[in-house]
Each structure stands twice: as C-alpha cells, then as structure tokens.
Amino acid sequence: MASNINRLYELAVGGDSRAEADLFAALTDRFRVFAHHKVWNSDDAEDLVQAALTVVAAEYRTIEIKTSFVAWAHTVMKYRLLGYIQKQRREKGRTTFGETAEYLTASWTPKPDLIIQLADCLKMIGKANRRYARILNMHRLGFSRKEVCEKLEMTQQQSWVVMSRARAMLRQCIEHGDIK
C-alpha cells in the first residue's frame, strides 16, 4: 500500500489531479486510523488529522523528500500528535477562569478570623519588608504583572522572585503566626 501512495505522490506532483485526490483520500484514511488509536477524543483526533493534512497539502509539492513520501507524511502526523500530547500535559493542571471564579463564589467564603489574620500578617510583612507587602497587596487588588513592575520599578524576573518570597513569608505567618 505504501508503494501505491508513493506512486500517487509522484503522479500528483506531476500534475495529475485524480492522483492528488486519491493520494489525500488514502492519507486521510491512514491518518484517521493512527489518530483514533492514539487519541480517544474523536473531535481532537479529527482536528489532528486535518492539521496534518493541511501541512502535507501545503508542502508536498515543494519539499525535498529524502526517504519516501509515506514516511514523510507520517512524520508530519506524528509531530502533530506529539504537539497535542504536550499541550494536554501542559493544560492538565490548569483551571479556566470560569471554573475558578465559580468555585470561589459558589463554595467558599472567607472566615472573619482568617481575614483578620491575613490583615495582621500583611502588617507584619510590611514592617519587615515593605516591598513584599506592596506586591502582595497589588496582586490582591488585581494589578497585572506589568503594572506591578512599573509601580515598584523592577523587572519581571525580579517580580517573580519578590512575589515568591512574599508568598512564602505570608504562608509562614498564617501557619505559625510569625514571619521568622
């Protein structure tokens, strides 16, 4: 079958429109089988197939193929699949804004004691390091990272470090009652 696809490729590159249609029909079938074995969500699998076919259609006439067309086409499909898997892994731990907002408003209301404790901790942090208190407060008020950096006159890298240290100090204060 692979030699048939390679032959169809040669004819399609030569300008045979019927061979081109047969070539993409054969690739579509192969890609669908491959994608549906690897991805259980049929919509995502179909999206992967279409993305791979789009790349093949855009490049098959101009690319220099060193092995065989079938091997090259399957490599395109394989890289689309790997990109999909990496994306799924990156997004696995994330929550969307709607889910987070719904969670916070529906099931959690701060206890008055906690609010008082946070205010006390913020005062202690402010006495120890005013910059830490400011960055925590600005974050709570909804300032963007860029706005925080402009107001506190720091780079984004510095803001990540300062925020991390400020959060650690706040955690220490909440858990143990002091910041040391």
Image (cartoon, rainbow, N blue to C red):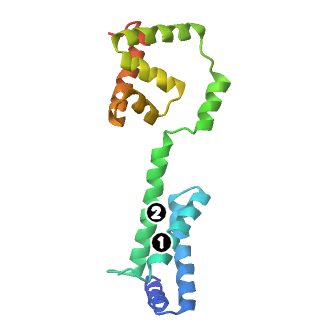
Indicate the amino acid at tag 2: Arg
Query: Where is 146 relative to 41, above or below?
Result: above
| Residue 131 in picture, x, y percent from top left | 37, 20
Query: Where is 91 relative to 117, above or below?
Result: below
Q: Is residue 52 left or right of residue 162?
A: right
Q: Which residue is mark 1?
A: 55
Find the distance from the CA under tag 1 to the CA under tag 2.
Answer: 10 Å
On the image, which quarter does residue 62 sit in? bottom left
Residue at (57, 90) in percent of width and height: 18
- Report the residue that reaches farthest toward the right: 106
Residue at (41, 6) in percent of width and height: 177
Q: Which residue is mark 2?
A: 80
Residue contact at pointers 1 and 2, CB within 8 angstroms: yes
Label 1: state its secondary structure: helix
- Mark 1 vs 2, N-terminal side: 1
Query: Where is 97 relative to 60, above or below?
Result: above
Frontmost residue, 28 versus 176: 176
